[in-house]
Image (cartoon, grey):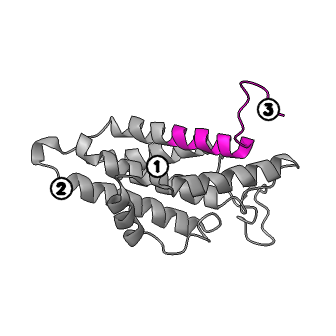
Amino acid sequence: MIVRGMSTTPPSEAQAKECADEILRAAASWAKEAPSELTPAIRAVCIRLAEMVADQRHYLSPLPEPQESERREMLETLADWLRGKPVTDGIEQDLQELADLELRSTGSWAIVPTAQAEWITTAIQFLDRRAAQLPDGELPDPYWPDDGVAGIIVSVRAVIGVDELQARYAAPPGANPAREES
């Protein structure tokens, strides 16, 4: 039975669409800080990071059921949505260029800090390379790519609802992360 005004879209799909829209708004917001020629590159970095975060749904600390199943389904739908034509239209070349620079396998991305740092460095280099193609008078601040990527990371984490991209098994076996060094 469908009640007038109710959506027939499954909740996880509606949440994923809303989340994707928020990610695109975050990308547009960060793009305002830079020359318009950099907008596609900024959008590509934001979308790719969000896709990678969503793809790491199996590595996030588990929630109690049914929230865990709902989150996993929403993140899976979000990752698929972010790879779709409505989101990637017009930035395919930017996404491909970024993919050519980044890690080929992101499966370890959520649990290996060096992989996260490498991706951040790659994103900064990608934006820096794009900014370097601008005429001298239009170049943004030299630290702009670093600030932009840091801001994009914070925005994506907030939109997806992942405060920290910590994996279940981020600490090495036997390590006690709560113990302070003397």
Give the magenta-colored segment's residue range.
1-23
Name the element at disc 1.
helix
Residue 79 in the image: above or below residue 26: below
Give the CA distance from mark 2 to mark 1.
Answer: 27 Å
Q: Viewer-proximal residue, 178 or 77?
A: 77
Quadrant in which the C terminus appears: bottom right
Q: Specify the quadrant of the image occupied by residue 45.
A: bottom left
Viewer-nearest residue: 105 or 5: 5
Residue occupying the point 53% across, 63% down: 116
**Marks 1, 3: nearer the viewer:** 3
Mark 2, other Cα within 10 Å: few <14 / some 14–19 / many ≥20: few
Quadrant position of residue 124? bottom left
Rounded to the nearest angstrom, the CA distance separating label 1 from label 3 is 28 Å
Disc 3 residue type?
Answer: Ile
Residue 135 in the image: above or below residue 28: below
Q: Residue at x 23, y 46 (%)?
A: 37
Secondary element at tag 2: loop
Q: Disc 2 residue type?
A: Gln
Mark sitting on residue 2: 3
